[in-house]
Image (spheres, helix red, strand yellow):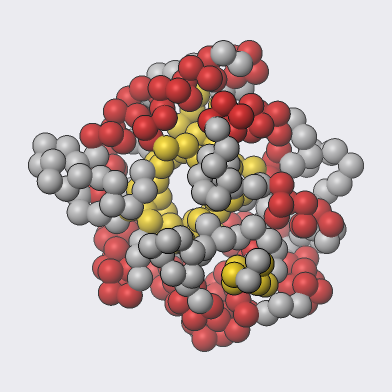
Amino acid sequence: MSRTPLWSRLVDDAAVFPPGLAPLPRAVADHLDRRPTAHGPFVGPLLVPATAAAEVAALAAADPRTATEPLEVALVVRPGATDPADTLDPLAPLRAAVDVLRDDEHVVVTGVELGADPGWQAALDLEVPVALEVGRGEARRAALDEVAAAVDDEADVTVKFRTGATPTWPWPDESTVGRVLDDVVLRGLSLKLTGGLHHVVRADHDGEPQHGLLNVVVAVHEALGGAEADELAGILRERSTELLAGAAARIDDPAAERLRETFVSYGCCGVTDPLGELEALGLLPTGGARP
């Protein structure tokens, strides 16, 4: 059964973002508490707003656990939050946040996340991995071309796409997400997702549609094998837990490594929800053992 590397550091901790909205002190404490547990190996960095860099530094310094193993964070600026009118430095807030934490002994910045706003390429000068959140339609394709050009120049850039609905972002249906996966794979890029993947199988929750984590994993696997966008949409529509869990369990380690080079991670405000469901399906180790 495929357990790692398929699931290793798959779920980034977005506890402070909607709908979770955990206070930052609690989010930091919970994240550090989780590190030595059975779920720890499957959780990536804590995602925090770039504007909270100084508070993160203070919280980490106050926790003795970060003296031996620093707190890993990714700094997030939501799309539209940069200021293209600032011709001197539209990414000044993000740059300032990275500078605050760059030499911090208690915090490690694993990357930055921002929208595909004009001038986003300035983030490449920060010398940390970049995740670029892209939109839809022609805007998405243009942004993907920009990412591909940056990657060709050996920049560490990952595409980011929002799979959950917000007040300003309608839920992207299976056809939309299928096209995103197809576009990313055809360009040889990497992808992270954000929003909406709280459960492992496609379903409606509280009357709202949600994509499933296993659907995405299996769809990416099939995309790497040559499946096209319409086939991927069909996988994303699948609601059979047995079928999807079986397909994921058959992914061997070499295929899992290739899959995770493409689907690098996703942000979830409640990391224990999908991990608990994967564990219940026998797809994660149980009993507290760290792989």
Q: Position of residue 41 (x, y in %)?
A: 70, 40
Q: Position of residue 39 (x, y in %)?
A: 74, 42
Residue 137 can be seen, yes or no? yes
Using the image, determine if residue 221 lies above or below residue 280.
below
Q: Position of residue 289 (x, y in %)?
A: 84, 38
Tell me the quarter of the image containing the N terminus: bottom right
Q: Residue furthest right?
A: 287
Q: Residue at x 33, y 52 (%)?
A: 79
What is the residue that sits farthest to the bottom in this orientation? 230
In the image, 117: left or right of 56?
A: left
Residue at the spot 64% in from the left edge and 47% down from the top edge: 270
Between residue 5 and residue 280, name the one nearer to us: 280
From this viewpoint, which residue is outermost toward the left? 87
Q: Is residue 242 left or right of residue 180?
A: right
Q: Would residue 69 appear left or right of 111 to someone viewing this image? A: right
Residue drawn at the location 48% of the way across and 70% of the way down: 171
Q: For this view, does 278 lie left or right of residue 105? A: right
Query: 269 above or below 64?
Result: below
Quarter where residue 256 is shown: bottom right
Quadrant containing the C terminus in the rendered view: top right
Q: Position of residue 242 (x, y in %)?
A: 81, 74
Say if 163 sits above or below 74 in the image: below
Residue, x 32% and y 58% (percent of image)? 147
Asked if one can make out residue 214 in the rendered structure from this viewpoint, the answer is no
